[in-house]
Image (cartoon, rainbow, N blue to C red):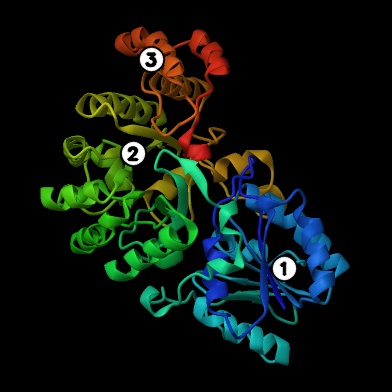
Amino acid sequence: MILFYNPVSSASKKPVLPMSLLAIGAMLEGVEEYRIIDGNLMPDGLTALREALVETKADILCVTVMPGPQLSNASPICRALKAEFPQVTILWGGYFPTLHGQIVMQEAYVDYVFRGHCELAFGEFVAKVRAGQDVTGLPGLGWRDADGRVHLNQKPPVPDINALPDFPYHRVDMDAYVRSSFLGSRTIAHHASYGCPFQCNFCAVVHKVNGRYSAQTAERTAAVVEKLVREHGATAVEFYDSNFFVHEARCAEFAERITHLDIGWWGFGRADTMLKFSDATWAKMRKSGLKMVFMGAESGDLETLKRMNKGGKQDGNAILAVAEKMRRHDVVPEMSFIIGNPPDPAKDAENTIQFIRMLKKVNPATEIVFYIYSPVPVEGAMLQEAQAAGFEYPKDVATWTEAKWEKFAQHLSSNLPWMNDDIRRKIGNFQRVLHARYPTMTDTRLTRTGRFALRTMAAWRYKTQFYDFPIELRLLDKVFPYQRPEIQGF
């Protein structure tokens, strides 16, 4: 028996379909017995895992780990279980061990890590571990030799997603992951592609896939969506792909295939790529239920985008143009900005603020999501400038679980060497005024009265660009609390 554990992913324990575990589980169907345990669905993950280990006599425990809340949940649980069940092989996979496998393997309670996509190698790993055979040659595996030295094998290539089986939805309680959102009353998540063909040096996806990309065909993706509608009552689908809108023809065909389902949907894309989409394709996507596209605008400054290695032809003009195009087609742009970047965070913050104001003139419906730059271990100007300012990664898992680094992992930390209190306040105050002047449409709990009050109170500040000391907005936020998409999603 194999146990898979999905650690607590946020303070609110918002349940999100554990697609990484379903992807591995799909390869085991009919071959291995396994169970998925989700820490977001129970009061105590440690107790649930302990009981499952006793009940099933499981010999392998696999944990998917993101930095932030998941790491803080997974680390003490695995330490306790290893002490109580030393015979159980504990393996970590996912984002954190892929980027920081060396420090994970310093922890005695973790026996192995898999870095990158391990769908094709995991079954062989299980068979060899149980047979007492050598596993050290498997792609993506992190392991320790007899002297305790850590070895990290080269990551495997991104697999052909069309050669992989569909997710085994019957292995989880799907109703626990269905939620109401602005997209629809029963919103479910899906992954229709792996990787991204671009190599932005602020994005950890680069470290995981190195520019590789594999997408389900339009026919396959539409079939999965229809299954979610037919068997699980989905009225909306969120695509968590790193980049859903890479190929226009695929997107147009997919839209045509799902129009009859009458659902809402949302996904990630790039401004410069989607600007090239024809009006006919945009019309098809809107008719099929596309309501919003998340785009990494990052910055309106061309030099900053070059330092980010954003690639393609994205610049401020492309961002503004696609926002205007989406206004005409009644699709909401959700654009994220990385603000306060080194080497001159004050200038970067001011430039970004002014660009966002320009963007709001072009399309007032544009949703703005803020992230403080958090370096990822990808070589390039951004990381070099951060390191030159004194930035260093933690050297052990315990430090990564500290509150400071939890915030860092969620792109919320301003406790960084190149930042100062003045810049932090400026960004925070502008963010508060902006989000009051333009309350997010994704917050279905915010009443019409609340929206009117927020817009009215913030109007004079936004018009005069006076953002300091927004005391009245802080008080109003207690009456009409604002939902932050960068933390809570929608």
- Amino acid type at mark 2: Met
- Residue at image mark 1: 110
Q: Answer with mark 2 or mark 3, whichever residue precedes in sequence.
A: 2
Going by the image, does 478 lie left or right of 215? right
Q: Describe residue 271's horizontal placement relative to residue 133 as left or right.
A: left
Residue occupying image coordinates x 61% and y 86%: 31
Between 99 and 380, the residue placed more toward the observer is 99
Residue 151's x, y, as percent? 62, 76
* Secondary structure beneath label 3: helix
Q: What residue did someone put label 2 on?
A: 335
Tell me what residue is drawn at x 54 percent, y 60 percent: 95
* Secondary structure at numbered mark 1: loop
Whether residue 287 is situated above or below residue 92 in the rendered picture: above
Residue 356 seen in render: yes
Out of 176 and 470, give the one closest to the viewer: 176
- From the image, state whether disc 2 or disc 3 is nearer to you: 3
- On screen, residue 86 above or below 389: below
Q: Mark 1 to mark 3: distance in Å?
A: 51 Å
Question: From what the image shows, is residue 287 above or below residue 79?
Answer: above
Q: Nearer the viewer, mark 2 or mark 1?
A: 2
Position above or below: 206 against 480: below
Which picture quadrant has residue 434?
top left
Q: Residue 455 carries which label?
A: 3
- Distance of mark 2 from mark 3, alpha carbons? 20 Å
Considering every residue shown, the one lying at the far right of the view is: 84
Q: Which amino acid does label 1 sit on?
A: Val
Tag 2 secondary structure: strand
